[in-house]
Image: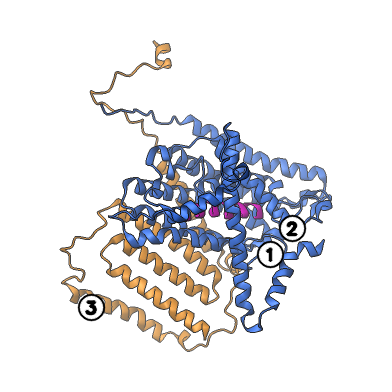
Amino acid sequence: MNALDQIFVTLHHWLIGLFPAAIQPLVSIVLIIATIMTVFGTCFAVTTIVERKTLGRMQNRYGPNRVGPWGLLQPMADGIKMLIKEDIVPFSADKILHFLAPLVLTVPIWLAFSVLPFGRNMTAVELDAGLLFFFAIGSASELAVFMAGWSSQNKYSLVGAMRGIAQMISYEVPLVLASVPVVMLAGSLSLTDIVQSQGGYAWGFIPHWNVFTPWGLAGFGLFLIAATAESNRSPFDLPEGESEIIAGYLTEYSGFKYALFFLGEYLGLFAVTGLAVTLFLGGWHAPMSIMEWVPSWLWFAAKFGVLIFVFIWVRATLPRLRLDQMLNLAWKFLVPLTLINLLVAAVWYWSRPLSDSFAGLELRWLSCAAIIALSYVCLGRNLNRIPSPQRHYTYGT
Amino acid sequence: MAHEITFYLIALLTLAAAIAAMSLRNLVHCALCAAGAFAGLAAIYLLLNAEFVGFAQFLVYVGAVAILIVFTILLTQGVEMKSSVALVSPSWLTGLAITGLMLACIVAPILASPSLHRSAPPNIAAPVKKIGEELMTGCILPLETVGLLLTAALLGAVVIAMSDKPPFQPKTAGNPPRRETQEEVSLR
């Protein structure tokens, strides 16, 4: 069991041992980078085909089915197409910024993977402030979106970039605030420590995952909503709303630069999903003590896959929000709710003595959940009470 | 040795970005160069083993302040500076005097301070946990004040955005007459 669990760690050590001692640190770094890029690059290719197939199934159509058996080779065809397409740069574009934007978007997102614990002893860089690093490095993508939109010198691009930045800034607040209770209760910003703190089982069968606490459940929901918006996915895909502004900040991109944006978007989704698994779903911990023989990295992958499927599902289900709805949801609903969630986490922390008996734990759980549920209902009703502005559309003749 | 090379490389890039931020003609380029200088500073903090400060610098300055600057540029006057305006102002003598004065004000206390003669502490790595403990014990009052202030600012921004002005009613003649709503019909 242990050998299988640590197979990648052992493999890594064995591979490093083949090199002279002087360059071993360098080899170790290169190996880790290559592994992460290969795994998540492949993950990107697989997700595109799975997403298109699933969307097709949910919308009662076939999806891609021409390339290879059941259309499984579609990602290869897409990749080749993107590589050999002509790279068109608009005449009036700001050439340097237009070139730099996809790089500024993609590079930080690759870096974000370095702090995620993919399994037991499988964190690339053990950072004391891992969570802070994740959010800090993620904030660079806003600048990239702006660079892309502005340098294209296209009205649609600029509008798309402005929408994108407004959305990313707005949803970064609930995203960070939703993960603060986890840091408070774990007492550490290190993602490895956060996963460690979720190990073990209550009465031998309920895992100590954060999602099984009232603040964790609420935080998980809030985190997922904010994460969907952060990665510009439907129903928050206004920055690229193709029925309104062509493709937003991607309008003037073609060929491989477009592919880089596409890659960056999916990698951002993967990174934030990995963070959700780490913060709320117990990271690489098994859900039952009798399932501990399954390797830890497999548990991480399983939870990761399920969450990605949920994102695809949401994309197939919900229509796109309007701009004012999107902003209202963030500022008037998610932010207050995350602040209340912080309070609930504090209540949960101070009522620890209650959890010795089953009845006490029940009381603790239900009273904490009641605070969140009550504020949820009140906020929702309050928002519904304010009528949305009557819209008058006039059409040119 | 490698440490020093890294430092000089980062310092050079930061300085170059800062100079470019002051001297480029296009305001958006200036703003992006300023963001580059902020990122360079964050890298220097990281080089000094100040993980927490470095990440916070990146998050706040590159993630928020740079975006704020960019928005300010786009929402105010045009991006391009008028070409008639000389890059170096004709009143450069005044500028030079003020800069010299400022520099003197900053440099004199630094030279006079005893911290120049102290040797560096042996272990300069500050783990996040220690910073947190220090913040929650020694500096609890400033921390709470800042936290309260920031939360108030956050809520204040939401309240400002929550304006309950009556919805805009266009009065142009070209509009078709508005149909009465169900409610108005029932009132009548």
Asked whether the beta carbons under mark 2 and mark 3 sit within 8 Å of each other, the answer is no
Which residue is nearer to you in this view: A252 or A25? A252
Quadrant of the rendering where the N terminus of chain A is positioned: bottom right
Which residue is nearer to you in this view: A352 or A105? A105
Q: Name the residue under label 2.
A: A296
Q: Can residue A24 be seen in this snapshot?
A: yes
Which segment is the magenta one?
A260-278
Which residue type carries mark 1? Met
Asked whether the beta carbons under mark 3 and mark 1 sit within 8 Å of each other, the answer is no
Q: Name the residue under label 3.
A: B97
Q: Which chain is blue?
A: A
Tag 1 and tag 2 share a subunit: yes
Chain under disc 2: A
A277 falls in the magenta region = yes
Q: Mark 1 points at which residue?
A: A122
Q: Is residue A263 left or right of residue A214?
A: left
User: Which-is-in-front pick, marks 3 and 1?
Assistant: 1
Q: Which residue is drawn at 60% across and 39% down?
A: A54
Chain under disc 1: A
User: Which-is-in-front pick, marks 2 and 3?
Assistant: 2
Q: Residues within 10 Å of mark 1 (few under 14, many from 20)?
A: some
**Residue A170 placed where, x, y %?**
47, 48
Which residue type carries mark 3? Ala
User: Alpha carbon of mark 3 to alpha carbon of mark 1: how far?
Assistant: 58 Å
User: Alpha carbon of mark 2 to alpha carbon of mark 3: how far?
Assistant: 65 Å
Q: Name the magenta segment's main secondary structure.
A: helix
Q: Is residue A191 above or below residue A233?
A: below
Mark 1, secondary structure of its residue = loop
Asked whether the beta carbons under mark 1 and mark 2 sit within 8 Å of each other, the answer is yes
Which residue type carries mark 2? Ser
Which residue is nearer to you in this view: A316 or A381? A316
